[in-house]
Amino acid sequence: MINSIGEHPWVEVKAQSHDGRRVSIWEKFLEWTPERLVIYARYDPGVVVEKHGHASEHFVFVLAGEVTVGERICGPGTNITLPLGHAFGPLIAGPEGATMYEIMLGDPRAIPADRERFLRLLADRGIEPLPNPPIPWPDWLAARTDGDPGAESGARVEGRVER
């Protein structure tokens, strides 16, 4: 398959409220089959992702900006290789945000590794999780496994797509 990033819209996949300002993770799904998911991802500045793993091998390459993974700051040129089921994070986008290229081989659904710690981290930073935005989920893949702390808070959100 040959395609261009420009052929795919940005899809909001996670959202948070930072002092009333919406902060999100955006992805372009370059390829999504039962065998693999290839995405071009953009993290807004300061967005926080809980520690999690995937039921697949996961490869992440930081293209621009920076993201702190656990205690390590990962800037442009950083490669992250995660074996099947290996958890990493939390991930915190730097002041400029981060742009990454990611590949997952197999089931790409996220599996939270430490929800309580994540919720404490959000509370400590004054971040309100918003409900998961709707995404174009394939029929052959079972429901999301990443949980939805924003829905638990009672917040409402509409998904967004940017062209």
Image (cartoon, rainbow, N blue to C red):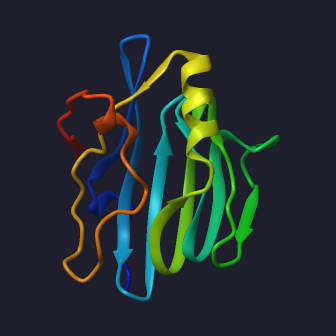
Of residues 77 and 25, which is closer to you in this image?
Answer: 25
Relative to 74, is 138 on the left or the right?
left
- x%, y% of residue 1? 37, 86
Count the marks.
Answer: 0
Determine the image quadrant of residue 119.
Answer: top right
Residue at position x 66%, y 44% in the image? 90
Residue that lies at the very extreme toward the top in this rendered image: 19
- x%, y% of residue 14? 38, 43
Relative to 23, is 130 on the left or the right?
left
Residue at position x 20%, y 30% in the image? 156
Relative to 31, is 116 on the left or the right?
right
Residue at position x 43%, y 88% in the image? 35
As displayed, is residue 95 above or below residue 132?
above
Residue at position x 26%, y 45% in the image? 133
Relative to 71, is 150 on the left or the right?
left
Determine the image quadrant of residue 120.
Answer: top right
- x%, y% of residue 130? 33, 32
As displayed, is residue 77 above or below residue 90?
below
As displayed, is residue 84 above or below residue 149?
below
- x%, y% of residue 7? 27, 63
Determine the image quadrant of residue 135.
Answer: bottom left
As displayed, is residue 45 above or below residue 14?
above
